[in-house]
Amino acid sequence: EAQVTQNPRYLITVTGKKLTVTCSQNMNHEYMSWYRQDPGLGLRQIYYSMNVEVTDKGDVPEGYKVSRKEKRNFPLILESPSPNQTSLYFCASSLTRLAGGPDTQYFGPGTRLTVL
Amino acid sequence: AQKITQTQPGMFVQEKEAVTLDCTYDTSDPSYGLFWYKQPSSGEMIFLIYQGSYDQQNATEGRYSLNFQKARKSANLVISASQLGDSAMYFCAMRDSGGSNYKLTFGKGTLLTVNP
């Protein structure tokens, strides 16, 4: 089954304790991206990757790191989490044939993070 | 500048009736794609329908159709014969060339409630 998986699905942690949210896709997609969703703000992009070893900042990258060592995996790293990073996080992936084309972004199930 | 506007924070519809969710967008790129996603209370993002800027016909997918009015820069989602399971948050999103980033820019969403 074609899918994007994220782990963990739920996480409660404390300020300053490093954490990693994993993301993996089995569709051989070049493009992967992380979004965060906050009430009233919709989804905002954190980081994205066009391919292996190619990553760049999105709209709200502060406090986050990513890596893309393999095509299928795109982990999100919070080196020193703070309460303002409490949010619902989504990983997504797609092909990249044409920007305006129908290559749908497929989303993972989401990770609900609470930083105390 | 906000690129996607969803002016209806919440909508109510009776079961079996049709409902239109509004979306307007802004881009200067001639090539772009418009997407609608559904987010039920469980949190996952479910792709519903896609419309390309060069498509001559309005997109349809089962009970979903997209009323695409290019000159007005609107891409309204029409759900026919509403079902209780359609109760969810609905997001309109756009992807244009935007440099090398294939990100989706999301609106803030419309919460649809289907009444029995």
Image (cartoon, coloured by chain):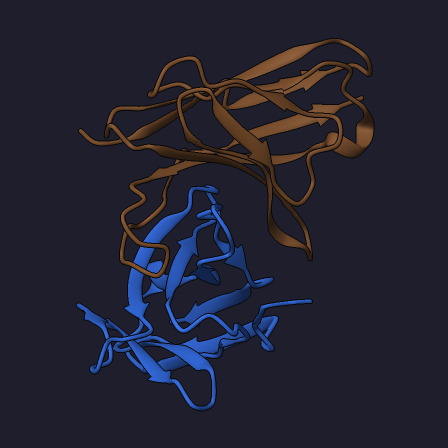
Chain colours: A brown, B blue
Q: Nearer the viewer, residue B11 or B77?
A: B77
Q: Nearer the viewer, residue A50 or A12?
A: A50
User: Which image quadrant: the C terminus of chain A?
Assistant: top right
User: Which image quadrant: the N terminus of chain A?
Assistant: top left
Most distant residue in the top direction: A17
For image coordinates 36% across by 45% down, the residue present is: A105
Horizontal side of residue B82 vs A49, given as left or right: left
Q: Position of residue A64 (x, y in %)?
A: 68, 25
Q: How many marks?
A: 0
For image coordinates 54% across by 58% down, the residue present is: B106
Q: Nearer the viewer, residue A12 or A30?
A: A30
For image coordinates 40% across by 21% down, the residue present is: A52
Horizontal side of residue A10 vs A84, given as left or right: left
Horizontal side of residue A11 vs A62, given as left or right: left
Most distant residue in the front direction: B99
Horizontal side of residue A78 vs A43, given as left or right: right
Q: Nearer the viewer, residue A75 or B90?
A: A75
Q: Position of residue B109 (x, y in %)?
A: 55, 63
In this view, A9 is above or below A87: above
For image coordinates 46% across by 70% down, the residue present is: B29
Q: Position of residue A10 (x, y in %)?
A: 56, 23
Q: Position of residue B12 (x, y in %)?
A: 49, 76
